[in-house]
Amino acid sequence: MTRTDDGPEPTTTAPSPRATVTLADVARAAGVSLATASFVLSGRGTSRSAGSTATKEKVRAAAAELGYVPNRHAQAMRTGRGGGIVMALGTLDDPWGVQLTARVRDDALRHDLSTLVLADERWFEYLLGASADAAFITSIDFIEQGPERVRRLAASTQTGIVAFSAEMEPEDFDVVASTPTSAIGRAYAQLRGRHDRVQLLAPDLSRRIGGTLAHPRTRAFLDAARAHGDTSAESLVHIVPDGSHEAFLAGLAWLTGPDRPGAVVCFTGYQAVALQVAAERVGLRVPDDLEFLSIGDIPASTEFFGPISYYGVDDVFARLSSIIVDRAVERAGRPGNLHTFDWEFFPGVTTRETDGAR
């Protein structure tokens, strides 16, 4: 066996195909210590203890050749690391969440971390009984005792938490504060300057406390309408079933009905995409017959008829992914940090040119 600066070359001797491949087998095959192999394959490959780049490559190559599969449960018990990132999104319908998850997945894989999506609101129950390196939680402000549940998770688990909340301050976890309240006010004023009536296209949130009308985005819209002297503001809220396909079908009915809108603020990006497709289907000219914009970033891959105008955060997916992955990789003794995201207007083909949107 020859030796290099990074240790001996991997041996070609492999365990019997019928035997269970252990971490010790991988270490022997790669010519490294058991501790080094553990660091490389446990999601801590960025640590200095994992050795040089060449050493890490040899360990991973040996693991692949031998067919080594780590025992994640035993690994979590030993190291306090679960080998993955949990994205608690609550739904799979929003392209914003899908795009963010795709970016987190790509960034996390560089650190040997997998990505898991929770498509319901049971993140508290799940994280109490699971081990994860980090969790990104989005629905904190909209469920009962959301902030208190985050604090309990931070105190009772080893999961690094990134809380998406406009109501919390960082403690032993990071907080991303990104509220669209002022952006909604600007969006309303922007469309109201050209239309006598501006409506909000919003999802049915009856499963959440207070429903759609109690949601902070809806309240911000209602405040903006009243500030412009528009009475019966609640009548401007057009509620449709939650989900992309359901929003499209409801959009078709709305655009062909007697109360066809001329200007719309869309509650989320996926609703704006659904409205754009519905307008194209019924033959409306955008923005001449229908002018609309989204509250929230829209991935370009979901826009079928040109970019949709929206209020959002610049480079939001890369910035969020960096915060989430960093929290998963570096957790020991790390204090919580506050990350504030400012919203701005990004013009597209669904609004008319204006100088007053910035």
Image (spheres, helix red, strand yellow):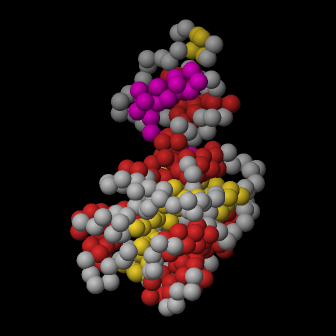
Query: In which quadrant of the rendered view does residue 227 lie?
Result: bottom right
Q: Residue at x 42, y 36 (%)?
A: 20
Q: Residue 202 at what x, y percent from top left?
A: 43, 76
Residue 68 sits inside the magenta stretch: yes
Q: Residue at x 35, y 66 (%)?
A: 288
Count of numbered tags: 0
Q: Residue at x 36, y 53 (%)?
A: 306
In this view, the residue farthest toward the top is 2
Does residue 328 appear anywhere in the picture? no
Residue 85 sits inside the magenta stretch: no
Does residue 134 appear anywhere in the picture? yes
Q: Residue 47 at what x, y percent from top left?
A: 66, 34
34 with respect to 275 (left or right) = right
Q: Residue at x 60, y 16 (%)?
A: 7
Pick whichever, 145 or 180, lies toward us. Answer: 180
Q: Which residues are magenta?
A: 53-79
Query: In which quadrant of the rendered view does residue 143 lie?
Result: bottom right
Above or below 16: residue 136 = below
Above or below 28: residue 152 = below
Q: Residue 100 at what x, y percent from top left?
A: 49, 53
273 with respect to 267 (left or right) = left
Above or below 81: residue 257 = below
Q: Residue 188 at what x, y percent from top left?
A: 53, 73
Query: In which quadrant of the rendered view does residue 283 lie?
Result: bottom left
In this view, the residue farthest toward the bottom is 232
The quadrant of the picture occupied by the C terminus is bottom right
Pick whichever, 307 or 24, lies toward us. Answer: 307
In this view, the residue farthest toward the left is 282
Chief secondary structure of the magenta portion: helix
Above or below 283: residue 174 = above
